[in-house]
Structure formats: structure tokens, C-alpha cells
Image (spheres, grey):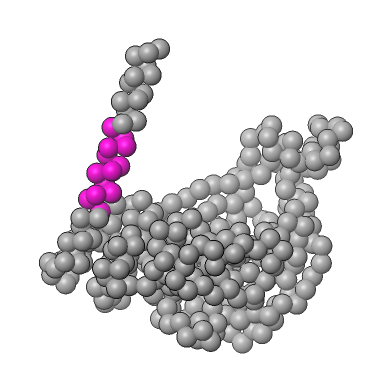
């Protein structure tokens, strides 16, 4: 991926809203070519993105607002720092789950805030290529708050919306998915996470004498869906409608390969060739897509061979 970006002369801008646990692993292969912009006003468990080898790293200790003109917001600092949010935890809803106590508010604070548009302008950045939002309840509204030009430029979008009401008035997956697929994205990856559906008093009764009954329950009971990690990629139809330049197709191809979507990456390569003609760019995109497909086929054949040998030995 780094060689492709170097060949294309493209330096991606990667924006991480909710950066307390460090940058996403999927970005590591292109870190040396990329600008990383991370946000998290709760720095109690902050990871050092600067150690991840990005070409340029900027950490902003502000909350990301969805309303223009916002200078500060109220922030709910919860027992677990990764659960802190500008939205108030919905403790009545969470009372049914073993993770309830993680969302208890230890204190409230007024923290500096601004929209992504305002912060990028302040930093002299003119685009967002890949946006990852883990804002604890406001992912969709943050994406929608982008100005039209910035919003149209987002090629990949990671969000972590809820499936249950963990925060009052949060953006749920059903709302986010409906909006995104109607506005130029397709769902490339979905991982469902969850919590044990049991009240704290029930767990204390089930695990008497245990200091952390919730942790015991997490090991003993199947979790129910509570939230998900979703990745969306820009559609070819959306790029065509926007009259996107060749560089946008090339970067979308790279992002698709990072997400292990070589079939779609090949679609992008062939569409780029159709629109701009056959040249070294489209040849590199096509070759990289086919190479990843070949590696996947070899892995599948090896896995089948190992399974056959295990069956034979058994």
C-alpha cells in the first residue's frame, strides 16, 4: 500500500474522532504516507499516536461538535474513559446490562469544542480521506455536520453506533446505515459487539463473594448485541456523480485493499481505466487487486489442505 501511494503521489488525511486507544490498526500500512488527526478530550487513557509512525501527527484535545459556532460542550466523564461522551449515559436502559457501572458519570466538565470544518481550516487541511468516528453516540451527526465539499470527499468511514440506548438521544446503527447507503456509501464490514443482559443485583447474587461480578458474567454468559463497528466505502456511482479525479479512484482502490476488498478494488481500477484511459495508474491498481486476490486464493487452498490432512489423520 505504501508503494502504491508513493507511486500515485498521494498523502492521505486520516481523521480519528475518539482517539483515546490509539489509531486504527488498518491505517498502519500507510502511516508513513499519511497525516493523522486525532481527537479526544478525555485523555485519561490516551495512547500516543505519534509512536505509530505517521508522516504528520496532530492531536487535538477538544470535543468535536456538530453545530457550527460551538466553542465548548458539556462532557460526561464516565468511570471507563472510553465511555465518556458529550451525551448523558442512559443509565435506565443500561441497568439491564452488565456494563452499566462503566457508564457511571464521575464528573462533568466543560471542554473546548469545534466542528471538524473549523478545526481543519485552523490546521490548514482541506480534506478528509478516511474518517473514523467513535464519539459515543454522535457519529452520524458529526459526519453530517461536515460541509458539502468535505463530506463528499470522504472515501472511507468507520463508525461505532449503538444497537441499544446507551446514551440519551444517540445516533443508532439503523439511522446511520439508512442515511449512509442513501448518500453514496456501501457497507463493507460489520462487527457486532455486546454485553451480558443481566442486572447488577442479579449478577451479585449469581457470583457471591466475587469482587467483580460483571467480569465473571462476561466470561460465563453469551453477550447480547449492544453496538457495532461498521466500515463504509464510497460507491463508484457516487464518484462518477461527483466527477471525481483520477486520484480519488486511486485512493479508493488503496483503501479497498486495506479493507481486504480486492474485488471492489478491481472494480475501481477498471472504472478508472474506463474513465481516464489505460495508463500506469490503472495498471498498478489492477495488478495490486489481482495480487491480493491471488494471496487470498492461496490462503484458502492452504486452509483446505490443512483441513483435509486433519480429517485424514483423524
293 falls in the magenta region = yes
Q: Is residue 197 above or below residue 45?
A: above
Q: Quadrant of residue 210?
A: top right
Q: Residue furthest right?
A: 209
Would residue 201 be visible to someone looking at this image? yes
Going by the image, does 206 lie left or right of 12? Answer: right
x and y percentages locating residue 47 in the rendered image: 62, 62
Q: How many marks?
A: 0
Going by the image, does 300 lie left or right of 65? Answer: left
Range shown magenta: 289-301
Going by the image, does 263 lie left or right of 53? Answer: left
Q: Residue at x 82, y 62 (%)?
A: 106
x and y percentages locating residue 50 in the rendered image: 54, 67
Q: Quadrant of the C terminus?
A: top left
* Prevailing secondary structure class for the magenta stretch in the rendered image: helix
Q: Quadrant of residue 265?
A: bottom left
Q: Residue furthest top?
A: 314
Going by the image, does 202 lie left or right of 26? Answer: right
x and y percentages locating residue 297 in the rendered image: 27, 39
Q: Residue at x 56, y 70 (%)?
A: 38
Residue nearer the viewer, 309 or 162: 309
Q: Quadrant of the N terminus?
A: bottom left
31 falls in the magenta region = no
x and y percentages locating residue 221 in the rendered image: 67, 33
Q: Residue at x 28, y 32 (%)?
A: 301
Would residue 117 be visible to someone looking at this image? no
Amino acid at each position: 500500500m505504501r508503494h502504491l501511494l508513493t507511486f500515485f503521489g498521494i498523502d492521505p488525511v486520516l481523521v480519528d474522532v475518539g482517539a483515546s486507544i490509539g489509531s486504527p490498526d488498518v491505517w498502519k500500512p500507510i502511516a508513513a504516507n499519511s497525516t493523522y488527526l486525532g481527537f479526544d478530550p478525555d485523555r485519561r487513557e490516551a495512547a500516543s499516536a505519534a509512536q505509530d509512525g505517521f508522516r504528520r501527527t496532530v492531536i487535538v484535545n477538544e470535543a468535536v461538535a456538530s453545530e457550527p459556532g460551538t466553542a465548548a460542550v458539556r462532557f460526561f466523564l464516565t468511570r471507563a474513559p472510553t465511555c465518556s461522551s458529550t451525551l448523558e449515559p442512559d443509565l435506565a436502559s443500561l441497568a439491564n446490562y452488565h456494563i452499566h457501572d462503566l457508564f457511571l458519570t464521575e464528573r462533568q466538565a466543560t471542554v473546548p469544542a469545534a466542528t471538524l470544518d473549523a478545526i481543519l481550516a485552523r490546521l490548514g487541511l482541506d480534506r478528509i480521506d478516511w474518517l473514523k468516528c467513535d464519539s459515543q453516540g454522535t457519529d452520524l451527526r458529526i459526519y453530517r455536520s461536515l460541509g458539502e465539499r468535505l463530506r463528499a470527499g470522504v472515501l472511507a468511514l468507520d463508525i461505532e453506533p449503538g444497537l441499544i440506548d446507551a446514551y440519551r438521544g444517540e445516533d443508532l446503527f439503523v439511522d446511520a446505515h439508512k442515511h449512509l447507503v442513501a448518500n453514496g456509501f456501501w457497507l463493507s464490514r460489520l462487527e457486532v459487539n455486546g454485553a451480558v443482559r443481566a442486572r447488577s443485583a442479579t449478577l451479585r447474587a449469581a457470583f457471591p463473594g466475587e469482587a467483580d461480578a460483571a467480569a465473571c458474567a462476561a466470561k460465563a454468559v453469551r453477550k447480547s448485541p449492544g453496538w457495532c463497528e461498521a466500515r463504509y466505502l464510497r460507491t463508484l456511482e457516487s464518484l462518477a456523480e461527483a466527477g471525481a479525479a483520477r486520484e480519488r479512484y486511486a485512493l479508493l482502490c488503496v483503501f479497498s485493499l486495506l479493507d481486504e476488498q480486492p474485488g471492489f478494488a478491481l472494480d475501481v481500477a477498471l472504472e478508472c481505466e474506463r474513465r481516464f484511459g489505460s495508463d500506469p495508474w490503472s495498471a498498478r491498481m489492477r495488478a495490486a487487486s489481482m495480487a491480493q486476490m491471488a494471496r487470498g486464493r492461496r490462503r484458502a487452498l492452504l486452509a483446505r489442505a490443512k483441513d483435509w490432512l486433519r480429517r485424514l489423520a483423524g
